[in-house]
């Protein structure tokens, strides 16, 4: 939904776009194009991530989910993994001062460095009552999330399972499903992200590499969303 005032165009979303999820792809290619090490691409990607999280809040989005580290990303070189862990650790330092955001980490924290895990859990606990939600998928995989949910339901002795039961046992149990999923860097696949939750999401793919994805690119994605007609299976 687009509102204009006299001086400049101001974008505001309504309740039909309350949750945007991002597959932040292209950090490596951004670095390669500049003959830089891959970690520099992630560093620039982290700057873009903070910018986009701020802008989403400004235009009225209620929930943002980002795919920061997948269960498959452990296959990358140690130096690159360490760089992403450090970016998360530095981000948590800054997030502790950000009083308007609720932080939720989606994924299996148990295998992460203990100090990092404790700080992630503390941030989640201390921000629980806030309105704007940032879900950071970290050591996250959509299939693993579903397996965890099914095992929890089995351990509760459930023999007949509803869709609601599954939704309530996912890492995203406190968020509604994403209305829009954005993937950058000219890749058109889901890569094990929000497999259950994306059932009726709209998708937006762009060639722009994640470190170059800025407010203007976000606005393009939002405007594209508002051109779509969502029927949710109806007519
Ligand atoms: C995919 O690009 C990106 C990642 C695997 C990491 C995403 C991480 C960030 C944006 C910064 C970290 C932010 C936090 C909060 C930890 P790629 O490396 O696969 O890019 P390529 O396909 O061009 O190689």
Image (spheres, rainbow, N blue to C red):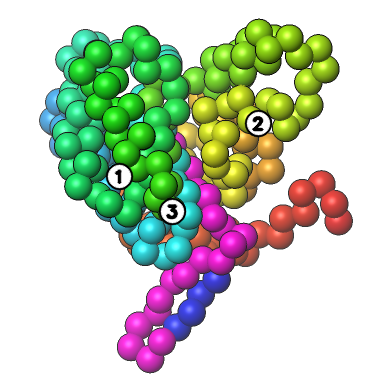
Viewer-proximal residue, 133 or 7? 133
Local packing at callout 2 (Cα closer than 10 Å; few below 14, some 14-19, many 20+) is some
Label 3 Cα neighbours within 10 Å, binned few <14 / some 14-19 / many ≥20:
few
Judging by the rendered image, the residue that carries numbered circle 2 is: 167
Q: Which residues are magenta?
A: 5-24
Mark 3 residue element = loop
Judge left or right: residue 79 versus residue 228: left
The answer to whether residue 16 is left or right of residue 24 is: right
Task: Kindly report which numbered mark, 1 or 2, lies closer to the viewer in this rendering.
Answer: 2
221 to the left or right of 214: right
C-alpha distance separating marks 3 and 2: 20 Å
Provide the residue designation for mark 1: 49
In the image, the residue with mark 2 has its CB under 8 Å from the nearest atom of ligand 1: no
CA–CA distance in space, label 1 to label 2: 27 Å
For ligand 1, tell me if the residue under mark 1 lies within 8 Å.
Answer: yes
Question: Helix, strand, or loop for circle 1?
Answer: helix
73 and 25: which is toward the camera = 73
Query: Residue 131's mark?
Result: 3
Image position of 90 (left or right of 186): left
User: Marks 1 and 3: which is nearer the front?
Assistant: 3
Residue drawn at (41%, 35%), measured in percent from left and top?
104
Is residue 23 magenta-colored? yes
Q: Main secondary structure of the magenta part?
A: loop
Instruction: Determine whether the residue tagged by mark 2 lies in a helix, strand or loop.
Output: helix
* Spot occupied by residue 213 in the image (x, y as percentages of width and height): 33, 50
Tell me residue 32's x, y (percent). 21, 30
Q: Quadrant of the C terminus?
A: bottom right
| Foreground label between 3 and 2 | 3
How many C-alpha atoms fall within 10 Å of the one at disc 1: few (<14), some, or many (≥20)? many
The reply to whether the magenta stretch includes residue 210 is: no
Q: Earlier in the sequence, mark 3 or mark 2?
A: 3
């Amino acid at each position: 939904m687009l509102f204009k005032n006299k001086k400049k165009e101001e974008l505001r979303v309504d309740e039909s776009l309350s949750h945007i999820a991002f597959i932040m792809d292209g950090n490596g290619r951004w670095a390669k194009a500049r003959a830089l090490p891959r970690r520099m691409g992630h560093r620039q990607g982290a700057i873009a991530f903070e910018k986009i999280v701020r802008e989403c809040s400004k235009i009225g989005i209620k929930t943002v989910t980002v795919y920061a580290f997948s269960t498959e990303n452990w296959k990358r070189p140690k130096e690159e993994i360490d760089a992403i862990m450090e970016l998360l650790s530095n981000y948590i330092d800054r997030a502790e001062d950000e009083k308007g955001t609720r932080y939720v980490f989606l994924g299996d924290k148990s295998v992460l460095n203990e100090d990092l895990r404790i700080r992630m859990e503390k941030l989640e606990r201390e921000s629980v009552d806030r309105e704007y939600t940032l879900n950071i998928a970290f050591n996250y995989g959509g299939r693993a999330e579903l397996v965890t949910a099914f095992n929890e339901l089995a351990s509760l002795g459930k023999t007949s399972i509803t869709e609601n039961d599954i939704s309530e046992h996912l890492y995203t149990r406190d968020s509604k499903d994403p209305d829009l999923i954005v993937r950058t860097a000219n890749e058109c696949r889901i890569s094990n992200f929000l497999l259950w939750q994306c059932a009726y999401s709209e998708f937006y793919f762009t060639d722009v590499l994640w470190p170059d994805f800025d407010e203007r690119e976000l606005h393009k994605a939002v405007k594209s969303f508002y051109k779509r007609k969502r029927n949710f299976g109806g007519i």
